[in-house]
Amino acid sequence: MVGKILIPEIKNLIEARNFGALRELFLDWPPADVAEVILDVEENDRVIIFRVLPSDLAADVFEYLDVDAQQELLRGM
């Protein structure tokens, strides 16, 4: 739910290419919430968000995505 509220801010960070701030935004989020945000944004933005995550968080987030979303994300990378 919180992720949906922050989607405009997330999109602004991506458009501004402020990847450090984007990474910081997600550091304290539970992996399930990050996965929810990833599913709520456009495919190109999904890949960007996933790539800026620390590897341990990215692995946890990946587990929360359904198989179709996982495959789509991998194709986008």
Image (cartoon, grey):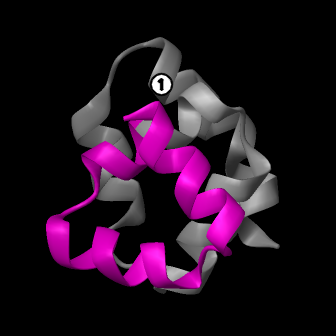
- Percent x, y for residue 14? 47, 24
Number of numbered tags placed on the structure image? 1
| Left or right, residue 68 beside residue 24 | right
Q: Is residue 63 magenta?
A: yes
Tell me which secondary structure the magenta stretch mostly adopts: helix
Name the quadrant containing residue 56.
Answer: bottom left
Residue located beneath label 1 in the image: 14
- Which residue appears at 40% of the width and 63% of the height? 26
Residue positioned 74% across, 69% down in the render:
2
Q: Where does the image place residue 76, in percent across and percent down from the top left?
A: 47, 33
The answer to whether residue 32 is above or below residue 13 is below
User: Hey, which residue is sitting farthest top in the picture?
Assistant: 16
> Farthest left residue?
55
* Rendered location of residue 35, percent (x, y): 59, 69
Of residue 56 and residue 4, the one placed in the foreground of this image is 56
Answer with left or right where residue 10 lies relative to residue 29: right
Which amino acid, by three-letter code, is at mark 1? Ile
**Is the residue marked by circle 1 packed among few (<14), some (14-19), or many (20+) residues within 10 Å?**
some
Circle 1 sits in a helix, a strand or a loop, which is it?
helix
- Per the rendered image, the range of residues in magenta is 48-77
Q: Position of residue 44 (x, y in %)?
A: 57, 26
- Residue drawn at x 18%, y 63% is 54
Quadrant where the N terminus sits is bottom right
Q: Is residue 76 visible?
A: yes
Quarter of the picture containing the C terminus is top left
Closer to the camera, 70 or 3? 70
Locate residue 55 relative to residue 5 in the image: left or right. Answer: left
Instruction: Relative to 59, say whether 47 is above or below.
Output: above
Does residue 52 sit above or below 25 in this rendering?
Answer: above
* Residue 64 is covered by the magenta coloring: yes
Kindly tell me whether residue 29 is visible in this rendering. Answer: no
